[in-house]
Image (spheres, helix red, strand yellow):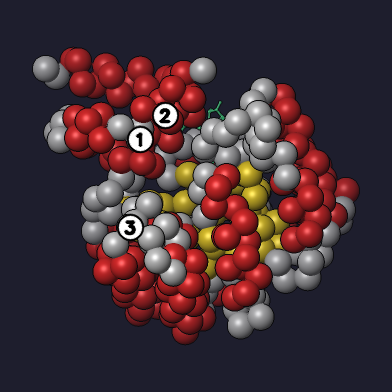
Amino acid sequence: MLRRALLAASASERIRRLVTTTPLARGVVARFVAGDTAEDALAATGGLLADGLLVTLDYLGEDTTDPQQAAAVTDEYVRLLERLAAAGMSAGGRAEVSVKPTAVGLDLPEHGEKTARENIARVCAAAAAAGTTVTLDMEDHSKVEATLRILGQLRPDFPDLGCVIQSYLRRSGDDCRALAVPGSRVRLCKGAYSADPGVAYTARADVDGCYARCLRALVDGPGYPMIATHDPRLIAIAAAKATLAGRAPDSFEYQMLYGIRPAEQLRLARQGNQVRVYVPYGSDWYGYLVRRLAERPANLAFFLRSLASRR
Ligand code: FDA
């Protein structure tokens, strides 16, 4: 209930202005976001790689309606990949990038899907030159069809382009079965958005049940599953399924968000697992922050306390 209300409130321009202009919000943001600049992102990446973790970098921004902005975001990814390569961080996919289709044009009033596809292809080419990969983030349910279409159109040229499946959507079991093909990289998460019961599970148990079914399809299949969750129960289920399927540790990976359960990230990596941390950076952090607050009431309480205590 609170989650739905928060996600809905995030669409309000007044609330956005209030939160983003409050200097104190930045303390909370720093917990989840590496910083404003590519330098900040590279510094965080260096630290995580040194700890034996892998990284996927997200240049924050979404819902772009301006073609120039979509091109600028694409340029930022291309430059970032060049810098990662120069710093020796991208080879072998140690640091890769995550791209939101609406940040690179999907929502443009004209030719949105075509623009997003062309911009994503540019990022994929830069990633290939840097020896690494791209994963397409999945946004709200209205973007799923177009995102999977772009994936299907680009995979012949960039077979390691990855995507995300969200277990809160009723369609996701079918999507996982369709995507469980050789070479396919699929990140499985619960989903950070909300949708009507017609398309989405709303009870936590149903979302988790769908997650377990999707896991089975991906782990038993011939692709490369990326298990994105902080949920200890689902991590245990994934580990058991991977063992049963006889998967080698380098044939799948766990993924978690920057700043969330960092000790667990290290524990899993020290057990010999591949663990990738999703590292967002950039100044357009509002939408990302609201989703992290909505996931966990304790985060919201922390945020409100930090505002109140320093007034
Ligand atoms: P759940 O929310 O049940 O949390 C389990 C436990 O994890 C909690 O009890 C708490 O300990 C900890 N935890 C979880 N969230 C926390 C938070 N915000 N702050 C502090 N602790 C927290 N979603 C999406 O819709 N599209 C996408 O492309 C992606 N991409 C993505 C990449 C990666 C690497 C991850 C890890 C997640 C995503 N997500 C996402 C977000 C995902 O859908 C989901 O919202 C969050 O991962 C939270 O769900 P959990 O599976 O962690 O379980």
Residue situated in front as seen by the camera: 124 or 39: 124
Where is mark 2, residue-wise? 8
Describe residue 102's horizontal placement relative to residue 53 as left or right.
left
Quarter residue 246 falls in = bottom right
Quarter residue 75 falls in = bottom left
- Please say whether residue 210 is visible from this viewpoint: yes
Residue under the image location 63 percent in, 61 percent down: 148
Q: Position of residue 31 (x, y in %)?
A: 33, 37
Q: Position of residue 264 (x, y in %)?
A: 55, 38
Where is mark 3, residue-wise? 65
Q: Position of residue 3 (x, y in %)?
A: 48, 24
- Residue type indicated by callout 2: Ala
Few, some or many residues within 10 Å of mark 1 (<14, 14–19, 20+): few
Q: Is residue 291 above or below residue 147?
A: above
Residue 11's label in the rendered image is: 1
Describe residue 50's horizontal placement relative to residue 169 as left or right.
left
Q: Earlier in the sequence, mark 3 or mark 1?
A: 1
| Residues at circles 1 and 2 in contact by the CB criterion of under 8 Å | yes
Q: Secondary structure at mark 1?
A: loop
Q: Is residue 90 above or below residue 176?
A: below
